[in-house]
Image (cartoon, rainbow, N blue to C red):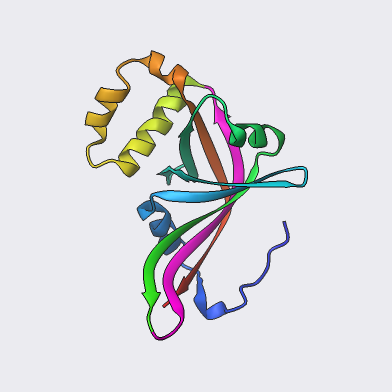
């Protein structure tokens, strides 16, 4: 993919640790998908597996996003840290990360468990309590699809 330079280079976040911190602190990502010439955008909560450079999602067994992913697994997404509107400046303070990568359906039971644990740890204050309540046994994993976004590139931007 052709890489563009940022128009306002002073807003570019170049520190990879800072970019990863935004992803680590975020709770949702908006993904852009496409099949043929039809666009689709969806916002999902996620878990970030820093070691794998991947995001995990859970979804229903059927749905439009799965239909899009089957045709074209390449996606672009954004995570935004909203710092609020700046009154009197007609501006908004934020930090954001744009992610590029490939979305795949996880079929291996152990990786499904790993992905769900990553999500619960990322999103929940008491992940083990939620896991005990909602994932009592392995059969529960048959009722959900786990998706993994393998991140191939990411860029960060900020506005004060």
Is residue 99 a member of the stretch shown in magenta? yes
Name the residue: 33% across, 43% down: 123
- Classify residue 59 as left or right of residue 135: right
Q: Is residue 110 above or below residue 66?
A: above
Front residue (pair 109, 87): 87
Q: Residue furthest right?
A: 36
Where does residue 138 sit, x and y in percent of width and height?
38, 15
Residue 136's quadrant in the figure?
top left
Quarter holding the C terminus is bottom left
Q: What main secondary structure does the magenta stretch of the protein show?
A: strand
Where does residue 39 sit, x and y in percent of width and height?
68, 48
Is residue 156 a member of the stretch shown in magenta? no
Quarter holding the N terminus is bottom right
Where does residue 149 sit, x and y in percent of width and height?
54, 41
Front residue (pair 156, 83): 83
- Classify residue 118 as left or right of residue 40: left
Front residue (pair 64, 2): 64
- Classify residue 23 as left or right of residue 33: left
Where does residue 156 sit, x and y in percent of width and height?
51, 65
Name the residue: 38% across, 52% down: 24
- Counting the numbered discs, the total is 0
Q: Which residues are magenta?
A: 88-107
Q: Is residue 142 above or below residue 33?
A: above
- Classify residue 113 as left or right of residue 100: left
Name the residue: 43% across, 32% down: 115
């Amino acid at each position: 993919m052709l890489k563009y330079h940022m128009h306002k280079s002073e807003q570019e976040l170049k520190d990879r640790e800072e970019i990863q911190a935004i992803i680590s602190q975020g709770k949702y990502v908006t993904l852009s998908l496409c099949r043929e010439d039809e666009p689709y955008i969806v916002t999902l909560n996620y878990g970030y597996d820093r070691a794998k450079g991947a995001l995990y999602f859970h979804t229903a067994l059927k749905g439009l996003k799965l239909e899009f992913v089957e045709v074209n697994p390449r996606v672009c997404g954004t995570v935004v840290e909203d710092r609020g509107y700046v009154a009197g400046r007609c501006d908004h303070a934020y930090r954001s990360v744009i992610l590029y990568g490939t979305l795949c359906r996880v079929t291996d039971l152990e990786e499904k468990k790993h992905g769900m644990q990553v999500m619960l740890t990322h999103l929940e204050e008491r992940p083990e309590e939620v896991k005990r309540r909602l994932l009592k046994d392995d059969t529960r994993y048959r009722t959900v699809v786990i998706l993994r976004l393998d991140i191939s590139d990411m860029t960060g931007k900020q506005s004060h």
